[in-house]
Amino acid sequence: MIIYGKNTVKEAVLAKRKFHKLWLDEKNTDAKVKQFFDYNTINYRMTSKHELNLMTKDQNHQGMVAEVEDYLYTPLESLFDGTIKQVLILDQVEDPHNLGAIIRSAEAVKIDAIIIAKNRSAEINPTVAKIAVGALEYVKVIQVGNLVQTIKKLKDNGFWVVGTDLDTDKTYHELDPNVSQAVIIGNEGTGMSRLVKLSCDYLVKIPMVGKVNSLNASVAAALLMYQMKKL
């Protein structure tokens, strides 16, 4: 997996992710950068900005690109240890920028895990890693084949499953940090799928008083996660 950007690469080093290759901009004169990698015994090669641009398809790499071991998804069963868990489920959230931003917010509030589906959903990739700005190293992401079946397993293990929808009287103030709960964010355009919505214990909405009645998925997720933890 390719990752890029100063903070993204630095956090991968600190999290002990296995590095296969590391490239730095040959015009980088910051001795502290090289000392950091030397101290952590990470070998690197100096190369041109043009080569870095090719590796990242002209993304903002900040003069630092690495090839690291692939991201390891966390098994669903890790949630079922009997302790209270706060989990976010993403139902067909397809934009990798949204996923990266959600992971960054999840790390800030220490959400226990994010669940994504294998189909019709963004997955962990270089764009997600860059937008998450290093938070990917500290957030458990669980990838599942079927969200409806996963919701059933969560319920069987004591979770409340809460959907989000405008057509409900309950607000996100109903979320309770003292119980295990999994809150669902739906697709950026169409919301939750029908079967997922039917599987929820109840629905909540984010109260809005302005004329625009929708939020970006990553913004909505951040608001919900703070309510889940009541920070």
Image (tube, grey):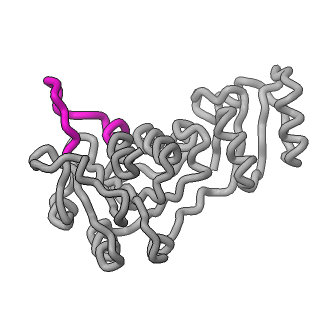
Task: Give the residue drawn at x 52%, y 58%.
Answer: 140
Residue 179, horizontal then vertical, whole percent: 35, 65
In reply to whether residue 122 is colored magenta, the answer given is no
On the picture, is 1 further left or further right than 27?
left
Q: Between residues 224 and 23, which one lies in front from this camera angle?
A: 224
Q: Between residues 6 and 161, which one lies in front from this camera angle?
A: 161
On the picture, is 9 further left or further right than 181?
right
Q: Residue furthest bottom?
A: 156
Residue 170, horizontal then vertical, whole percent: 15, 50
| Observer able to see residue 94 | no
| Observer able to see residue 139 | yes
Magenta stretch mostly in which secondary structure? loop
Q: Quadrant of residue 86?
A: bottom left
Task: Give the residue drawn at x 35%, y 59%.
Answer: 119
> Quick check: 49 above or below 176?
above
Q: Quadrant of residue 129?
A: top right
The magenta region covers 205-220
Q: How many marks?
A: 0
> Quick check: 213 above or below 122?
above
Residue 154, horizontal then vertical, whole percent: 34, 72
Task: Give the residue drawn at x 33%, y 61%.
Answer: 182
Residue 215, horizontal then vertical, whole percent: 26, 34
Q: Between residues 87 and 22, which one lies in front from this camera angle?
A: 87
